Image: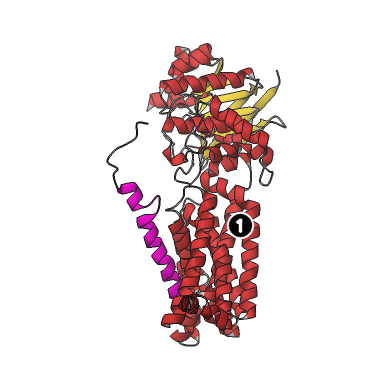
Amino acid sequence: MTALYDVLIGPFVEFAFMQRALAGALMLSVSACLVGVFLMLRRMSLMGDAMAHAILPGAAVGFLLYGLQIVPMTLGGLAAGVIVALGAGVVSRLTIQKEDASMAAFYLISLALGVLIVSLRGSNVDLMHVLFGTVLALNNEALTLIGTITVMTLAVLAVFWRALVAECLDPLFLRSVSRLGPPVHFIFLGLVVLNLVGGFQALGTLLSVGLMMLPAAAARFWTSRVGPMCLLAVAIGAVSCVSGLLLSYHASLPSGPAIILSAGAIYIASIVAGTRGVLATRVRHASHRTA
Amino acid sequence: MSVCVKFTDLTLGYNSHPAVHHLTGTVQAGSLTAVVGANGSGKSTLMKGIVGMLRPLSGSCTIAPGIRLAYLPQQSELDRSFPARVIDLVSLGLWPRRGLLGRHRLEDREMISKALSAVGLEGFDERPIDTLSGGQLQRALFARVLVQDADLILLDEPFNAIDSRTVVDLIELIKRWHGENRTIMVVVHDLDLVREHFPEALLLARRLVAWGDAQKTLAPDNLLRARQFNEAWDEDAPWCMSEGGHDHDRAVLHKGGHAGEAGRRGAA
């Protein structure tokens, strides 16, 4: 029993940095996993990845001007993300180009700009800092920021839930009964940017997408309703955070990848064992029902 | 009888090419109209124009104030892989009454189950939508229209790829709506169906060919005229210069007024 305690609970009780990391990661999984479910359902799973790259130049500008400080980097990242999201969204609505193509174009421009800015001063080590985050060094400022983002995300999702579901399920219908369709899309993109920016403090720009998408993708194999899928994604995200942090603590692994790989393991297990996964749908029953 | 929808020299189209050309007329409240015409004759475009999803190139389309509208598009953008149940899909129809935040009440749930049984989908409430057949999905969408409880109902080719029994059921539903004094416009391809069930018809061939009593509208000479229109756009067509029609450009040529399109095809 004590051994179990030492392995699972001890690190979080003993060390303040582990408590902070846990609090930050859990709050982030509540909001990012919810956003991830809708990203996946809107077939925009890769757009999260693109947006994560898109926020780099903003964060880099903040980093260049003020060093590794959370507020300037966050605001910079937010600005860059919003510009790219709006740019891609506007191009896709005003021209024949679909959003995946315009998003790819905008994020590549943004990413190149970001790498350029980072290389203007400093070395690749700095870039690694921006890209891979520092969940084990979350200060009060960062925790407050993540907490605020979580509350905002939950509030916005609660208010716009019905519109978001309708926009995913039948956008043409929503357009015929309401003008909310386009605004809801942009509000949602805003949430994506906000959560990625919150995530890059904890996990880095590259891995924050993982916490957003992997639990959502795993949850898809277990249920065919949106509400339960959201709850399940959050639960998977939380479990991944805890196990990732423990792995990182006990095996001296980097925390970000440990969290994402934990989520990855759950994803792969879900593909195989989920109620809508490979085993359940591909294995033939010897008999079939009459109707 | 009051006017429900009014077209005033309405031209709708894409990239300055008209798809519905100079349409003028009124749809009476409580009427049941079949919209007929060949592929590319502007039927779906007209529906989009009435819903307001497509802005006129010129002229106007006005709907009487206070009219609640329900629209069932031909090419639904419905995502069938979305994790929703039939009841979730049909509940969308509550939007006009409950909006974004209004609570769905007990009476709403009753209305939904009544709508489901009216289209013959009792017991389908909990079924995921990706398990429905084409006909079942169309029934569910009709149930959603029922729940919308609209005054003006626009159905764009609702009988496509639907078996005859389902067509009969859906026609019954449309007739019920007609009896409840709702205004209904249905895009239909099957002319026999129109002659049998629809009091009025609107025959389009980009421009209006005939509009009124269904039997007269579908008379052979009208149908012949409707067939002789040039479906393709002419990129170099001169600007349409008819009265008040300067707002849209690159229009199809009018050679001596509205017979122009047919005439041009004959000459080609």
On screen, residue A130 above or below B220: below
Q: Position of residue B123 (x, y in %)?
A: 50, 32
Left or right: where B182 falls relative to A224: right
Left or right: where A46 falls relative to A27: left
Residue A83 shows in this picture: no
Q: Residues within 10 Å of mark 1 (few under 14, many from 20)?
A: some
Determine which residue is flagged by label 1.
A187
Q: Quadrant of the N terminus of chain B?
A: top right
Residue A12 shows in this picture: yes
Q: Position of residue A167 (x, y in %)?
A: 55, 47
Which stretch did the figure color magenta? A255-283
Residue in the image at 56% along x and 22% along y: B174
Q: Main secondary structure of the magenta part?
A: helix
> As drawn, which residue projects farthest toward the bottom?
A122
* A65, A5: nearer the viewer: A5
Residue in the image at 40% along x and 28% along y: B161
Q: Position of residue B257 (x, y in %)?
A: 53, 25
* B212, B18: nearer the viewer: B212
Q: Amino acid at mark 1?
A: Ile
